[in-house]
Image (spheres, grey):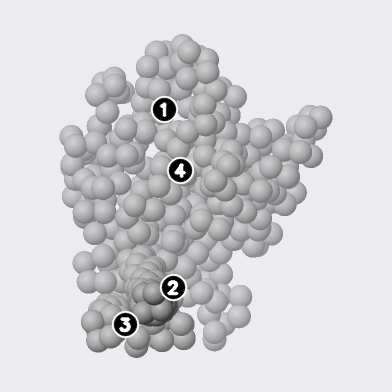
Amino acid sequence: MKTNVLIAAGLTAAVILGVFLFQGAGEERARAEAAAAEAEAARAARMELITDALSKAERLYQGYYYDEALAVLREDPELSAAAESAGDDAAGLIAAKIGEIETAKGSLVRYDGPVHHVFFHSLIVYPQLAFDDKGHPAKGYNMWMTTVKEFKAMLPLLREKGYVLYDLKEYIQEDPEHPGSVVLRDIYLPEGKVPLVLSVDDVNYYDYMKPDGFADRLVMGEDGRVWTEVETPEGVKTVTRDGDVVPILDDFVEQYPDFSFRGAKGTLALTGYEGALGYRITDGLPQEAEWQQTVKTIAAALRSEGWNFACHSYTHNSSWFQAGRATLGQVKYDTDRWKEKIEPWVGETDIYISPFGFTWKNSDPRYRYIIGQGGYRIFCSVGNSRTIRNNGDHIVMPRVNLDGYTMNRRAEEVKTWYFDVRDVLDTARPPLEL
């Protein structure tokens, strides 16, 4: 009996010991598995950091932010530590990308070719409304406007041609030897790339255009970007990203950052007699103060996204400017009015885009008032000389209108410089009869 008890006790002890040994092995295995999981998580975190850094640097590099891209890969101690821990492959990827960016930066060449500045008016969203000859005559729209479909077709063709959006303000700098004068700034781009300035006239959304298939105004989206408010032919108000040049171009550059040199987009030329950006901020209406703040908010968002603003005169008076008959008093009124009523809400600018493309002699007192009182250092007219004239305290840059008139009447010129009109022209556009 005692023997059986001893045997049972021995078996129990063995079982208990086995349990402890099993538990110990299980705990050891659990610790090993936890350590392995922790190591894998750390490795995954390192690789995510490296991948994110490479992706960020690549996007900056594609947008010609060479120094900023190099800083991402060189100046983050966490990235350096992660690359060192990840091994030679990760470090090699970073080193290769740094070498690629440095080579690209070192291979930039000075651009000495023609000056390309193209401009548009607000885009036609619904051709069936613009060309129905109800309200504003269809012929005017057919001559001087571009449709959304045409503009969207132009962008990839311009990119394929090697054009890169370039900031108009970056064309000049203060003359270090002659204070108050300007000199042209050297432009450096990759071989084969061509700087392209883009501007949009009358970004005001005039009342006469509202029934004719254009956007009604620019608005801030919930995502912090600038959208367009458009009324459909059925009378439904919509907020869309394809209602005018601004959101369409913003989205294209987002997709193709190599189409914009360091985030440049274009210049928005505003008049003032019906407000700005679709808001009547100059008429003394009850909502004026609210709308002024809205314009200020939108303008700040646009500037942060690479857009400039320009004075396009306050009145845009054809009898004053189209034939160059404005008196000095009229010019003073117009210039002062814009600076008083529009500039406080869109910000200061040194760009003047002339209404109807007028030019006067540099010595003309009317012209000198615009340049001097306005503080404008860049004056943009209309013409296809593709050359800049330096008048000492400012430059004069011509612009080419890519609209119905130019595409129909100057198709060969457009093909030489930009694209084949046949690949762009909207079939909804009626024949242009002059």
Q: Distance of mark 3 from mark 1, alpha carbons?
A: 52 Å
10 Å crowding of disc 1: few (<14), some (14-19), many (20+): many
Seen as rendered, the residue at the extreme front is 1
| For discs 1 and 4, the disc positioned in front in the rendered view | 4
- Are the two marked residues, 2 and 1, in contact with CB atoms closer than 8 angstroms? no
- What residue type is disc 3 on? Ala
Q: Distance of mark 2 from mark 3, alpha carbons?
A: 48 Å
Q: Secondary structure at mark 2?
A: strand
Q: Which disc, if any, is residue 184?
A: 2
The answer to which image quadrant residue 300 occupies is bottom right
| For discs 4 and 2, the disc positioned in front in the rendered view | 4
Q: Distance of mark 4 from mark 2, alpha carbons?
A: 30 Å
Q: Which residue is mark 1?
A: 125
Q: Which disc, if any, is residue 253?
A: none
Q: Residue at x 76, y 38 (%)?
A: 290
The answer to which image quadrant residue 273 occupies is top right
Q: Is tag 4's residue or tag 3's residue first in the polypeptide sequence?
A: 3
Q: Residue 388 in the image: x percent, y percent? A: 40, 63
Q: Secondary structure at mark 4?
A: helix
Q: Is tag 4's residue or tag 2's residue first in the polypeptide sequence?
A: 2
